Image (tube, helix red, strand yellow):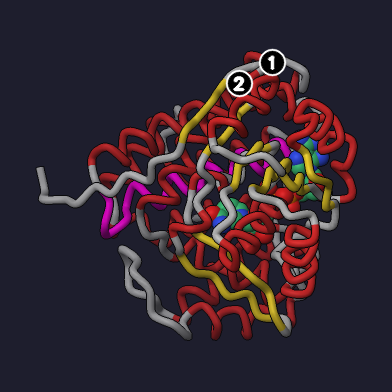
Amino acid sequence: MNPFVYNSHAARIVFGVGSVDRIAAEIERLGAERAVVLCTPHQRSQAEAIAKRLGDRAAGIFDEAEMHVPIEVARKARAAASALRADCAVAVGGGSTIGLGKAIALASGLPILAVPTTYAGSEVTSIYGLTEGGLKRTGRDDRVLPRTVIYDPSLTLTLPLSLTVTSAINAIAHAAEGLYAADGNPVISLMAEEGIRASAAALNPLTKDPSDLQARSDALYGAWLCGTVLGAVTMGLHHKLCHTLGGTFNLPHAQVHTVILPHALKYNAQAAPGAMRRIASALGSADAAAGVQDLARQHGAPVSLREIGMAASDLDHAADLAVSNPYPNPRPLERAALRALLQRAYDGASPG
Ligand code: NAD
């Protein structure tokens, strides 16, 4: 056993079908009386249903959450929370909406109760992101870690199947990189393996029947574990590449993760053989990288950057950005090898 430091990020997790019924009691438990409910325009009806459950404890709804938290939206949401005299934020949605809650908390310290409806995992991390002048800045701050998370699988029944698959692979990416993180530890590795297993195993039943509540529960359980890994240890090449591609070239978050993960794992395979064995075993595959790409293909997810809107002419710039700031990764970052990786990902080639 290698020496390690394990920092747990304590949040209260309330998990189960129907657990959203407990939201008023959970808000009370936080000592809050006026919640601003956050959502995207698309999820307004889910936010309204939650506001209704909150009754007098709902101060109002702010429904303008957007991908990557543009600073203008963050400022507007902070002003709305303040005008409503909110003493807590309830974020109902995926990483974009929870990210908006974090932007409010960063400025005001307002506690967040998160009700995740995708598998992105932001609800259990103290990582925030804000986009200003086309550049996404991320950081860690304990103020933005949601105090309570309500995981109710019934709220994920409306998640389209395509996003269900890519969001679950987004979750798997956190766990996969957690298994070779320089600051990893045995507890997080257990969570990572189980998170990959649960997320991957949920996809067969969900592809057959997206309303299978047991499989929805398994996927959300996997998302919680994988998100916890993301919040606890430092991510490497895969997350750096996805951050660059998503932020600079405006590619959709979960889809980018799905396309890049097999290639990032192959890049690191020889430098992290133990992690690769654990990832492969959790996927039920002989090989970690091929196993992830097979999972995507089997469930109709995109496997090329071309099909999710990347321009071939941007690949050189992307490779430059990927090596511009050093970050921990099992294998050193080599521009030529990364450019080749990006080409394979662009073409939808097998990871090799
Ligand atoms: P998202 O939150 O952008 O959601 C995508 C779309 O799906 C939105 O229109 C949303 O309203 C809709 N949607 C979500 N859940 C739904 C449901 N159950 N039913 C119907 N529609 C639903 O997507 P995401 O992938 O969850 O989040 C991506 C964002 O989160 C990115 O900006 C990413 O950087 C950030 N993120 C941050 C962290 C972190 O720790 N800070 C972690 C993961 C992701």
Give left or right: position of 70 versus 151.
right
Q: Is the magenta stretch mostly helix, strand or loop?
A: helix
The percent coordinates of residue 164 (x first, y second) are: 71, 36
Magenta stretch bounds: 162-184
Locate the N terminus and report the quarter of the image it occupies.
Answer: top left
Q: In this view, does 63 lie to the left or right of 105?
A: right
Secondary structure beneath dot 2 equals helix
Quadrant of residue 331 in the image? bottom left
Amino acid type at mark 1: Leu
Identify the secondary structure beneath mark 1: helix
User: Residue 266 lies in what quarter of the image?
Assistant: bottom left
Residue at (76, 48) in percent of width and height: 38
Q: In this view, does 60 lie above or below 129?
A: above
Give the residue at x 74% y 28%: 155
Identify the residue under disc 1: 213
Residue drawn 61% across the image and 40% down it: 32
Q: Where is residue 176 in the image (x, y as percent from the top left)?
A: 42, 46
- Mark 1: few, some, or many residues within 10 Å (few <14, many ≥20)? some
Question: Magenta span has 182?
Answer: yes
Residue 352 image point, x, y percent? 50, 55
Q: Is residue 120 above or below residue 243?
A: above
- Residue hosting label 2: 217
Instruction: Where is residue 175? Give x, y as percent.
Output: 43, 44
- Left-right relation of 299 to 10: right
Q: Are marks 2 and 1 in contact (CB under 8 Å)?
A: yes
Considering depth in this image, is 42 or 262 the residue closer to the camera? 42
Task: Indicate whether 352 appears above or below 242.
Answer: above
Disc number placed over residue 71 in the picture, else none: none
User: Mark 2 packing: few (<14 Cα in 10 Å), some, or many (20+)?
Assistant: many
Q: Which of 316 and 77 is in front in this view?
A: 77
**Mark 1: is the Cβ under 8 angstroms from ligand 1?**
no
* Residue 208 lies in the magenta stretch: no
